[in-house]
Amino acid sequence: RIEYSIAKLASHKLWNLLNTEPYIATFGALTGSQAVEMAKAGLKAIYVSGWQVAADNNLSNQTYPDLSLYPSNSVPNLVKRLNNALLRADQISWSEGKHDIDYLLPIVADAEAGFGGPIHAFELTKALIEAGAAGVHFEDQLAAEKKCGHLGGKVLIPISAFIRVLNAARLASDVLGVPTILIARTDALNAKYLSNDVDETDNQFLTGK
């Protein structure tokens, strides 16, 4: 059995922070050097933003709007690069007899709307764990119509469909043996559309228009 030690250690660190700190201040990192400097500055976690990846660090080498247009393995690739940089900084620090900075910070990665259905969410979560992510967050938009949360015209999926996405992500973490922190967020505050009315739980929010 493969031991995903970086992701496992980071997940435990993130869980401990969530249970002992009133909040966790962090920034989005686009490069390994930025991640290392964040550790030196005393941050306790690092964020990988889908918006940033779309704009400036995706595997298509393009500048995209925040519409999930970039290849779905772009975020796992960046998480891996950040962890490699942090590991190298940690190795150098220990070789110099310095132990005052914790470079192995937990990384929380943006999984957008999962880039598809539950199967896609499973594979994306698996890739993020393999890259060393401690936490992964999903949003409840329809993946094919995903938009930046600040834009209008957002389409949500039924609650039951979103639960299936989250269950698939949890299954991936269970299969890999890592207690990944899953974060579910909703765009329901400003969204006007629902992909369908199959879930009775959503009926209270339907206007018939």
Image (cartoon, rainbow, N blue to C red):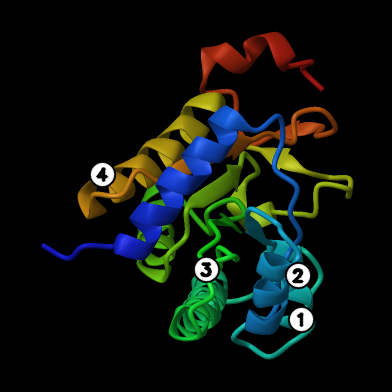
Q: What's the CA distance linking mark 2 and mark 1?
A: 6 Å
Q: What's the CA distance linking mark 4 and mark 3?
A: 33 Å
Residue sitting at the far top: 204
Tell me: 39 left or right of 150: left
Q: Callout 3: helix, strand or loop? A: loop
Tell me: 47 left or right of 180: right
* Quadrant that contains the N terminus: bottom left
Q: Residues within 10 Å of mark 1 (few under 14, many from 20)?
A: some
Report the disc number at residue 88: none
Q: Residues within 10 Å of mark 2 (few under 14, many from 20)?
A: some
What amino acid is at disc 2?
Answer: Gln
Report the disc number at residue 56: 1
Report the disc number at residue 174: 4
Q: Earlier in the sequence, mark 4 or mark 1?
A: 1
Q: Callout 2: helix, strand or loop? A: helix
Report the disc number at residue 99: 3
Q: What's the CA distance linking mark 2 and mark 4?
A: 29 Å
- Mark 2 and mark 1 residues within 8 Å of each other at the beta carbon: yes
What amino acid is at disc 1?
Answer: Asp
